[in-house]
Amino acid sequence: MFKVQTKLPSTALIAGAIIAIGSASLWFTAAAGEAEEVAALSSVGSKELPNNFPFLNPSGTAATFSTAGFVDLGNPFHVPQGTNGRSCESCHLVQAGWSIRPIDVELKFLLTNGADPIFHKLDANNPNPDVSTRAARYASFSMLRKGLFRRGGPLPSNAEFEIIAVDDPLGAGGSLTNFQAFRRPLGTANFHIARNIGWHDQNTNGSGNIHAGLVGQAAGNITGSQEGPPAAPATLESIAVYEEGLRFAQQTVFGVGKLTSCGAQGGPENLSLQPAIDARFNLFDAWIDLVPGSCSTKVADRKRAQIARGQEIFNAQNAGGGSCRGCHNAANNGSHVNGRLFDVGASRAQFREPGMPLYTLRHKTTQEIRQTTDPGRAIRSGLWSDIDRFKTPSLRGVAARAPYFHNGIAKSLRDVVIHYEVALGFRFTEQERQDLVAFMEAL
Ligand code: HEC
Ligand code: HEC
């Protein structure tokens, strides 16, 4: 068994992880001949993370570009604001696409024996967890260790439907009057092309006002998740402005190198200049039908051409009807340009995983019955037609933050594609699946 007894403060742990992962990726890029990035290493240890600093992920490296000139790890976002030692970065990690992966949570548990502030009863499997022994703590946070956080809210009093049955295997707190579900943290970047804050638009609530949504979200988190007193308006403003400056995207892909090579427009710096418009993805237009060997090696150019094929599959109408871009229509970002929420079937009972509550809902007038593991927007609006609708997230840097969908049911980007085939009737050949995945890995 693992026997580390030392309790590391979470900031040290995260800094350690950043240095470990960051310097590994520096080694990779330096080895690839990108010597200028080695200079960035001299800044590690200060509170300024250089723009475009690479972090490894399974597809290559991804990076953040901040319009402030550097990523300010001294911003109140990264500093505990409450009484339980948590900060925003407890759950939103720069190296995980500003979300958190199961491995990050597992690592925190192993290094602190479950004492890291993230292991708070607020995010345990249920509100009254057994935390008396290490083994009990480990079991009580089984959902958190999958990167899933307990979130929910009361059934609105004016809802068009009622909850007629609940199956809540972990006692998460679901009832005939209350929804509780397990959700992935959304990445806190790319808000220059966003219209919603929160998986069911709970912080913007149809207004499209991102700044106000971010301020409201931060205020609620500090008094809620961080158990603090109400934050000073200047603190909330500073956090919101910081988040609004962050652009996160894949930067290099294994076998290809920089996503700005040979005329392509990938990477976080280009993203920072991207306006919020409804248009096709065109990042990799320069790689369409690239002749192998015409830009760099034949192998790399074939991979470039594959990424460009994937882009065109994403842009195109699919044989099964619909298109990826139909919903992910904000050019080169993938959110919905008007902030529309959609039901892609991720909450259906057929995709339910162990631990997830299941709710049976009945329409008050039509008596229609529907089951869901998380009703999304309907928690806020109470509308039958909003059941299972969620925000259309930015797809940039998506390789850094598996698993996917609001509830993490897709463990890989390939699983995402297969989900769309099973749930929405998309039809792809095996080659098309691989091309689409290669494209998403380059976002
Ligand atoms: C305990 C973990 C945790 C902490 C701490 C935390 N978050 Fe989050 N954050 C989440 C989860 C989970 C979600 C998704 C919740 C949802 O929408 O239902 C989320 C969503 C968000 C979103 C929505 C992003 C989007 O694209 O819509 C923003 C913004 C955000 N968090 C900012 C912050 C800030 C700022 C702080 C600190 C003041 C913070 N978070 C602290 C877990 C956390
Ligand atoms: C009907 C609208 C719609 C269509 C069509 C659609 N998406 Fe999505 N996509 C969404 C929404 C909404 C979400 C979030 C859903 C959720 O979590 O429940 C999402 C989530 C995703 C995610 C996960 C993002 C994350 O951070 O977890 C990926 C990747 C993705 N879509 C890729 C695609 C691809 C590839 C296609 C085409 C095969 C596609 N989408 C088609 C609306 C759509």
Image (tube, rainbow, N blue to C red):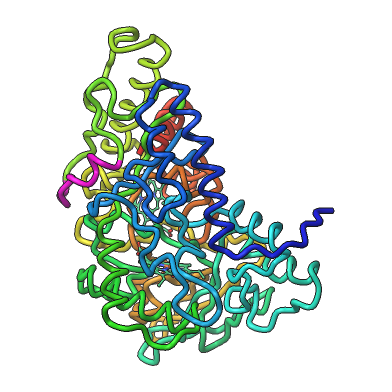
Height in image: 427 above or below 328?
Answer: above
Spot occupied by residue 414 in the image (x, y as percentages of width and height)? 50, 39
In front of the other: 179 or 265? 265
Question: Residue 79 in magenta?
Answer: no
Spot occupied by residue 369 in the image (x, y as percentages of width and height)? 49, 75
Spot occupied by residue 205 in the image (x, y as percentages of width and height)? 28, 76
Height in image: 224 above or below 252?
Answer: below
Q: Residue at x 54, y 56 (%)?
A: 14
Give the number of marks: 0
Question: Residue 273 in magenta?
Answer: yes
Quick check: 406 left or right of 353? Answer: left
Q: Residue at x 48, y 58 (%)?
A: 346
Residue at the far bottom in the pictured view? 157
Height in image: 363 above or below 240?
Answer: below
Please identify the quarter of the rendering in which residue 441 is found: top left
Q: Residue at x 31, y 78 (%)?
A: 216
Please identify the quarter of the rendering in which residue 210 is found: bottom left
Please identify the quarter of the rendering in which residue 172 is found: bottom right
Quick check: 170 left or right of 297? Answer: right
In front of the other: 375 or 109? 109
Quick check: 207 left or right of 295? Answer: left
Q: Residue at x 44, y 36 (%)?
A: 61
Ligand 1: image quarter: bottom left
Residue at the far right in the pictured view? 1
Q: Which residues are magenta?
A: 268-278
In front of the other: 219 or 140? 219
Image quadrant in which the C terminus is located: top left
Spot occupied by residue 160 in the image (x, y as percentages of width and height)? 37, 84
